[in-house]
Amino acid sequence: MSEEIKFKIDGKEIIAKKGQTIVEAARENGVYIPTLCNFKGVKPKGSCRICSVKVNNRFMTSCTTPASPGMEVYSNTDEISDLRKSIVELLFVSGNHFCPACEKSGNCELQALAYKYRMMVPRFPYSFKKKGVIATGPKLLKEQDRCILCQRCIKTIKDEEGRRYYAFKNRGNKLEVVMDEVMSKTISDELAKQAMENCPVGSIIYKEIGFAEPIGTRKYDKKPIGSNIETN
Amino acid sequence: MSKKIIATTSLAGCFGCHMSILDIDERILDLIELVEFNKSPIDDIKKFTKQVDIGIIEGGCCNSENVEVLKYFRENCNILISLGECAIMGGLPALRNGIPIEECIHEAYIDGPTVKLNEEKILPNDVELPMLLDNVYPCHDIVKIDYFLPGCPPRADLIWDALVALITGNEMDLPYELIKFD
């Protein structure tokens, strides 16, 4: 039995199916709520907080909060935009996100969110991390200073038997996402490209092809992130 | 209306941002009607001759001279703008942050694969040379910066719109395509 749930985002009526989260329902109804760690087909965990919204006057992550009838959700307010902007800024300063030298520039979700929220400069001091690059595999390299630890690669890049190519290593502020060295040697071309595509930043890079798309033709050059979802 | 006075400088930058200023094409003739340049590589004035309205900084701070020039600009400019990624976050030179200076210098002058002629293994040691800082610093880590214009280089239209808005006192209406980090 599929029940319809009606609630409101920024005053707009949203019709959701039972069990849908706020983010999913919003997308189906033409409202864009930014996400970074959340990815289609992966169980949401609400770790990056970029999808935070105000539900009945409390901050909630919209990727983990199920839609319920009559809830009043606020997403596109000054307060929440500034909160999201500060999350983007924290991600920028906690790694080494030097866009002009990054192969993902123009197709990067983190960068696109910085454009969307008009980040001219982060309000926090840069940390200038130096974790380095792991480039032992034949097809992919992993730039550790750009990784935002979103776990998308860990959860989506698997072989036919369901074994994961990526995993966490170390703990606390030494936490890193690394690729299995043995498995990385046999990764298919298609899956390698998928891994780069699924990474929201420029941490997973497909080797030997870089800067192939000219400036002006890339994903977020002309239109802000989410503009394909939004309807008025 | 009296002309606004502009000063510019390139610290640890590549002069790409200055090239982008010139990229406003024929509007530079309009600019000359609106402003007068003081200390700048464009007119080669070395020292401030009066208090300046707008100072434009390209590049971050990688050595003691950069810091000195930046502080000199802060003293003599009413408004300071960080222009481009290097001024905002250190940029390409900041890729050396986290690597010890000794290692960087040895790579550049002794061990690097392109070093051929330094058989005596001399490192730059002239007393006139400014000292390298431990890291490359964004300008706003050293002095107060009023405005930031990102880009590598910032688009000419962005520079033009920002300058015109500052000079005329009107609010800036920035289209999405103008704010880019690369």
Image (cartoon, grey):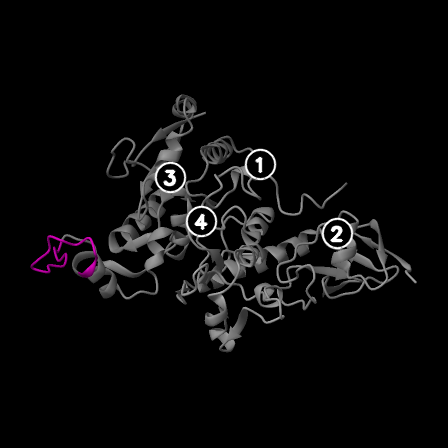
Q: What's the residue at 82%, 64% (across, down)? A: A19
N-terminal label among 3 and 1: 3
Which residue is denoted by mark 4 in the rendering? A209
Query: Disc 4 is attached to a residue of which chain?
Result: A
Near mark 4 (Cα within 10 A), the count class, few <14, some 14-19 or many ≥20, is few
Q: Which stretch appears magenta?
A: B111-127
Q: CA distance from mark 3 to mark 2?
A: 40 Å
Near mark 2 (Cα within 10 A), the count class, few <14, some 14-19 or many ≥20, is some
- Do the residues at discs 2 and 1 belong to one chain? no
Q: Position of residue A139 (x, y in %)?
A: 46, 58
**Three-letter code for the amino acid on which mark 1 is drawn:** Pro
- Disc nearest the viewer among 1 and 4: 4
Q: Position of residue A96 (x, y in %)?
A: 44, 59
Circle on res. B175: 1
- Disc nearest the viewer among 4 and 2: 4
Near mark 1 (Cα within 10 A), the count class, few <14, some 14-19 or many ≥20, is few
Circle on res. B17: 3
Q: CA distance from mark 3 to mark 4?
A: 28 Å
- Do the residues at discs 3 and 1 belong to one chain? yes
Task: Decide whether the magenta segment is chiefly helix, strand or loop.
Answer: loop
